[in-house]
Amino acid sequence: MNSKRLLTKEGYEQLNKQLVDLKNKQDHLITQIEEVAQPDESGEDGLVTQLKEELELTNNKIDEIQDGLDLSEIISDKVSRDSIQIGSRVKIKVSSSTKEFHIVSQLESDPSSSKISDQSPLGKALIGKKINDEIEVDAPVGKIIYKIISIK
């Protein structure tokens, strides 16, 4: 499967910054391990073990982000306002309140910032829909009906 994942320009830039930060952290951890490790000792001390575990987690995160970026394509800043797609900012009505979401790829999702993945249940239901469409989403509390108010 060689399909590209779509990323917003903002998401691509954030992931690149995160990658640079992680590579700097990786360099710092390697330096710390070299400084703390004593070649004459037969056993590793706890600090070295902890630093190596942190380095392994950092390396895994670097690989994950790099793979994600390698398989990604930046979507155009000119998102269609006719139907919802990755990059769309959507205002929806649920019960008596309105909420706004930015539809992004899984790599960029951050529900606390109202950035929802196109692969989430709500994201999947919204993709391809138009203004005034109603969608029904299964949630832990039962079915929730959303009405699309605007697409930016």
Image (tube, rainbow, N blue to C red):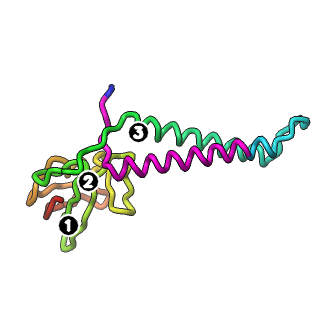
| Amino acid at pointer 3 | Leu
Closer to the chain start, of discs 1 and 3, is: 3
Residue placed under numbered mark 3 in the picture: 69
Give x and y (percent) for residue 115. Answer: 33, 57
Closer to the chain start, of discs 3 and 2, is: 3
Residue placed under numbered mark 2 in the picture: 122
- Report the span colored magenta: 3-31
| Residue in the image at 80% along x and 45% along y | 35
| Amino acid at pointer 1 | Val
Whether residue 67 sits left or right of residue 123 in the image: it is right
Q: Quadrant of residue 99?
A: bottom left
The crowd level at tag 1 (other Cα within 10 Å; few <14, some 14-19, many 20+) is some
State the predominant SS element of the stretch in magenta: helix
Badge number at residue 13? none
Badge number at residue 94? 1
The crowd level at tag 2 (other Cα within 10 Å; few <14, some 14-19, many 20+) is some
| Residue in the image at 63% along x and 40% along y | 56
Closer to the chain start, of discs 1 and 2, is: 1
Give the residue at the far right of this rendering: 40
Give the residue at the far top of this rendering: 1
Give x and y (percent) for residue 55. Answer: 65, 42
Which quadrant of the figure contains the N terminus?
top left
| Residue in the image at 36% along x and 46% along y | 106
